[in-house]
Amino acid sequence: MKNLIIVSLFFVLIKPSLYAQQIPKKKLDPQEWSLIKTDRKDNRFLNSRGIVYNLLKSTQSKYAFNPDFSPLQFRDWQKKVRESMKKIMQFPKVDNSQSPPKKVEEKKRDGYTFQKWEAYPLSSSVITYLVLIPDNLNKMNPVPAVLCIPGSGETKESLTGEEDINQGFRHSKFYEKNEMALHYVKMGLVAVAVDNPAAGESADLEKVTGNSDYDYVSVARGLLELGWSYIGYTAFMDMQVLNWMKRQRYIDRSKIIISGFSLGTEPLMVLGVLDTSVYAFVYNDFLCRTRERALVLTKPDSAGHRPVPNTIRHLVPSFWKYFDFPDLVCAFAPRPIIFTEGGMDRDFDLIKKAYKIAGKENRVQVYEYPKFNELKSRSMLQKLPEGIDASTYFKLVNVDPPMHYFKEELVLPWIKNIIRQKN
């Protein structure tokens, strides 16, 4: 009897799962299912993806930029954007009882001095950053400085030409081009480089294994569970370094520039909105509307998997309720900004309008990927079609992914020019 019970339990617990595995998977026609739709006559969705999709579609950003703003309305709007950003970033209070930042290493390099610093903004935290100081520095005459924020997989060491914690990432064909901090110090600027959370020195076991595939997801998930976000945490840490830069007597605090590459453009936008003293911005990525990106990227593969427009490290709760990326850049006006990897003309037209309202339309510099330099080669759409895949999306927003790197050849001359300008 006992054996019979055990056999019966086997069939109850095990056999259904075995049976489920034997059901053949069906392939589908991606084009047929490219749109998220319902076949119900009342137009309601049983499909949860469809329900969320329609909630997103009906969401209107409270502080989307209005090109018809008067100068007074524009300034009031900028203030509201800043207040909303402060709210959703959820910055904790800095623990001022902690030790002040300290220099832990200094070495002489060819034409500049390399320093490594530690800071302790929270009771359990250590953040490190690298400082490159040019030899021609006159401490009686402060010079402009650049806060350099890396992209995915990059580290502060990779930005400064130092020995990278993860040597595997050096295989990137644009590794030397992406040494943005090194480029800046060689032109006579102070360059400060940080790590993104979960990368480089702030990584977990990747420092042991040498794996360049950093586990951003676990950190982002933990932060979201705490009511924070990866971008909020990143911007908070970067803000501590930015504030440290302002206190250095050899840095001209009136001309501090933020330079972000790829992932680094997101904390750049947060800092730019929150800190109105930042002088200028280097936006080295394509500009997009992230809500639109989520709405149009719905064409599945043959296995029935729809695209995921972004991983959770990019997600900030309530972000789309208030604004999108172009709105944030509009809020930078009238401070100088350069875009090195284009996007859609309609978004740059909006930004130029914001700068025109602020009286400084000439402070926006836009460069396209070489592939899309010619007007006739670019998509001039005002609205992207729904039901597309990632490759179609990049083509329609004028992006050439294999050519994504730090565009020193565009950035350095532009910075030389804006530094000479009077405020």
Image (tube, grey):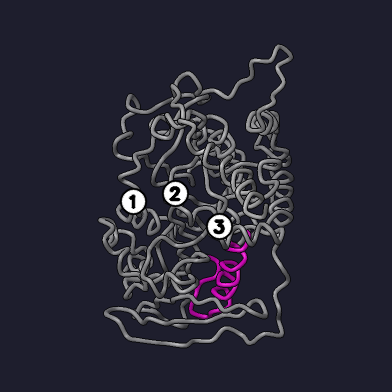
Question: Which quarter of the figure has residue 124?
Answer: bottom right
Residue range highlighted in magenta:
232-255
State the SS at label 3.
helix
User: Can the viewer see residue 132 in this picture?
Assistant: yes
CA separation in Å, label 3 and label 1 = 22 Å
**Label 1 close to label 2 by CB (< 8 Å):** yes
Please, what is the three-letter code of the amino acid marked with disc 3? Pro
Q: Is residue 353 above or below residue 1?
A: above
Which residue does the numbered mark 3 point to in the structure image? 267
Residue found 48% across the figure and 75% down from its top: 129
State yes or no: residue 246 in magenta. yes
The image quadrant of residue 37 is: top right
Other-residue count near label 2 (Cα within 10 Å), few / some / many at <14 / 14–19 / ≥20: many
Task: Please state which of the two labelled residues, at mark 3 or mark 1, is closer to the viewer.
Answer: 3
Q: Is residue 136 above or below residue 360?
A: below
Cα distance in 3D space between marks 1 and 2: 9 Å
What residue would you read off at disc 2? 338
The kind of residue tagged 1 is Leu
Whether the magenta-drawn stretch holds residue 419 is answered as no
Q: Is residue 94 above or below residue 10?
A: below
Using the image as rendered, state which of residue 310 and residue 408 is in the foreground: 310
The residue under label 1 is 410
Mark 1 packing: few (<14 Cα in 10 Å), some, or many (20+)? some
Pick the quarter of the image with the C terminus: bottom right
Q: Looking at the image, is mark 2 or mark 3 earlier in the sequence?
A: 3
**SS label for mark 1:** helix
Left or right, residue 423 beside residue 208: right
The residue type indicated by label 2 comes to: Ile
User: Residue 414's spot in the image, x, y percent?
Assistant: 38, 53
